[in-house]
Image: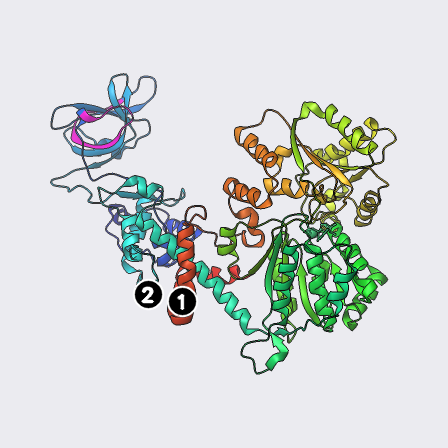
Amino acid sequence: MPRTALTPTEARGSVAAAPVVKAKSAPLRAMEKLGLRRDIDIALHVPLRYEDETRLIAIAELHDGVTAQVEGVVQRCEIQLRNRRQLLVTLADDAGDTLLLRFLHFYPSHQKTLAEGRRVRVRGEARGGFFGLEMVHPSFKAIDGDVPLATSLTPVYPTSASLPQAYLRRAVASALNRVDLSENVPAELLPPGITTLRDALRWLHHPPADAALAALEDRSHPAWQRLKFEELLAQQLSQLQAKCERAQQCAPRFRVTAGGLQDKLLTALPFSLTGAQRRVAEEIAADLQRARPDSGRGAQTSVPMHRLLQGDVGSGKTVVAALAAAIAIHNGWQCALMAPTEILADQHFRKLVDWLEPLGITTAWLTGSRKGRGRREMLERVASGEAGLVVGTHAVIQDDVQFAKLGLAIVDEQHRFGVAQRLALRSKLERHALEPHLLMMSATPIPRTLAMTMYADLDISTIDELPPGRTPIVTKLFADGKREAVVARIRDEVAHGKQVYWVCPLIEESAEGDATLIKNDTRSSKRPFGERPDLQNVIDTHQKLTEALPGVGVGLLHGRMKAADKAAMMARFTVGELSVLVATTVIEVGVDVPNASLMVIEHAERFGLSQLHQLRGRVGRGSVASVCVLLYAAPLSDTGKARLKAMAETTDGFEIARRDLAIRGPGEFLGARQSGAALLRFADLNDDLHLLHAARAAAEVMLKAHPDAAERQVLRWLGSKADYLKA
Ligand code: ADP
Ligand code: MG
């Protein structure tokens, strides 16, 4: 029979064992919903706060706002019907002082326990009422004979409506008794002065009466340090394991020969590389040439590269990618470059064609919107190996795309791809005997701390220098009412032959706001524009700017346009036929028009800092001084103000990422890993860097010297989530 409520035995607290019944009770189902399945999960469900039931205070010591426990004898217990039906209880302690208890909701059992002459212990917040101090809805229990006070603070757990606190307390207590908390970490690898996991958990669930509550609440207590260290260690271990697994795989080994394609590309470029570009290009080339240390297959194979190339917007990542592609192609292998949007893929394609086709490399172009014969021809070129370089959107990883010899995969703006797409890419690649090398690129710099935790299985190359001759972008804040001044400024820029972006927010638009979206979402694509206020906004703005700027070519670009129309519009802006482009965030990633010198962002307060930084990076790409105007709807909240001010104060992508991390938490940066993955529950990357370093060091030693303990540690903390982290 399914149990839906506490049985009387449970309510009295004599059931110690974790409830294992054939049909799951409601509290048990509620526990599973909270992820509390294994004993260890339950033991790691730490209290939100604590209640002090270890002390009694005299009623005379109570004052307004104090939460405390008092004990006394009931002098009066009566139901009052005036105003509103309520139960009023007068309690007198041994000193003879009295306290009023007020219950607005009550049951007959209340009256029974709180009957005149009964001795009770009550706990609640004292308030100064009309008739002196009172407690509204205190917790209470009858005291028959000698009932000792609690010896430790009483935990209050995060819970849900169908999971009573008392049930959870018992479940935790019994899980703590059963669970195996034997030490996995060799003592010499623990940070100095740290407690055992067993002690830490006992302490956190049942702190002694004199515990420093402040240290518990701000998580600086040694017990917390242990929990955080444990968590970070499990995460580091699982990522290093992923790295080791990868190290077992084989990728083609490339040779970089003098006078090869990459040298030819370098010679043909209209600029010379910055120092940072040269450094990261060498790091990549070293990965591609490195022979496997062990392999029986000898010097022919290498460990697959798994590298993240990060660099601020405009730092010149594309040419570094092109150099890597040239190495692969020179060695007779194919290179695929995947970008998250069609516009971006198109830009890459044009640039790479310009650079690589003169060197005799054949390229292919694959996107969702390319269909029919054109697509079939492209697929043949890819399958036959004729195309050395294949550029496209996620169309590159569709089932019908077969590579003759894929040796290098490059993913631009990798964090924009979802879990499914990343897994598809991996499974596609695993079909071949040899793994391709993988280079991921990102213009959203990952703060170092985050990179170390969440991307411990990646090697990271950073371009920390912009190409020379760039004038820093000046950012200005304008209230929406000052639009006229902004339009005047546009007129001025255009008169000087410059180009302007005007960006409007479009909330529903996704990063892949292109043809695939329209195709899959017929309902909304059939809806007239007028029903979509956001879209209407960008269309209205386009209209108004067209009227305000007679004789100036003003274009419109948004995610609901057909891919071909978008490409055509973008091309007209690129060649300078249009001077102003009104757009949604489809232009956010990677669009490159060096002649654009003014960026206006409407409703800037609605964007994330990193997104604003990306958008701003669309200007200041040539040598002309560029301006970014952030238009905001007044009044701004205090954080809103602080955020926009941060944008005006710095153009350093890393600094902005750091501030964004502080404001929005790590989710923004993690892309694929954010959803459902084991984000840190206990550790905080801003405060716990020292623990992260200790965990990293311990993980490296444990994997080599204590692999079994390492495995136990990962299972203890991540259970089935471990695989997910490797996606
Ligand atoms: P991002 O890192 O944002 O992808 P891009 O690769 O698009 O940047 O490069 C931005 C612009 O800078 C492009 O026009 C590119 O051709 C140019 N560029 C790249 N490297 C250099 C360099 N070393 N010197 C001058 N211009 C460069
Ligand atoms: Mg780019």
> Closer to the camera, 108 or 89?
89
User: Which numbered marker is on residue 510?
Assistant: none
The quarter in which the C terminus is drawn is bottom right
Query: Residue 694, position in %: x, y?
Result: 39, 57
Q: Secondary structure at mark 2?
A: loop
Magenta-drawn segment: 61-79
Query: Residue 529, position in %: x, y?
Result: 76, 36
In the rendered view, does 348 fall on the left or right side of 724?
Answer: right
> Closer to the camera, 411 or 159?
411
Residue farthest toward the bottom in the current orientation of the protein: 296
The disc, 2 or 1, on the residue closer to the chain's N-terminal end is 2
Residue 68 shown in magenta: yes
The quadrant holding residue 587 is: top right
Q: Are marks 2 and 1 in contact (CB under 8 Å)?
A: yes
User: Which numbered marker is on residue 186?
Assistant: 2
The quadrant holding residue 148 is: top left
Height in image: 637 above or below 317?
above
Q: Which residue is mark 1?
A: 701
Main SS type for the magenta part? Answer: strand
Q: Secondary structure at mark 1?
A: helix
Residue type highlighted by circle 2 = Pro
- What's the CA distance linking mark 2 and mark 1? 10 Å
> Closer to the camera, 264 or 90?
264
The quarter in which the N terminus is drawn is bottom left
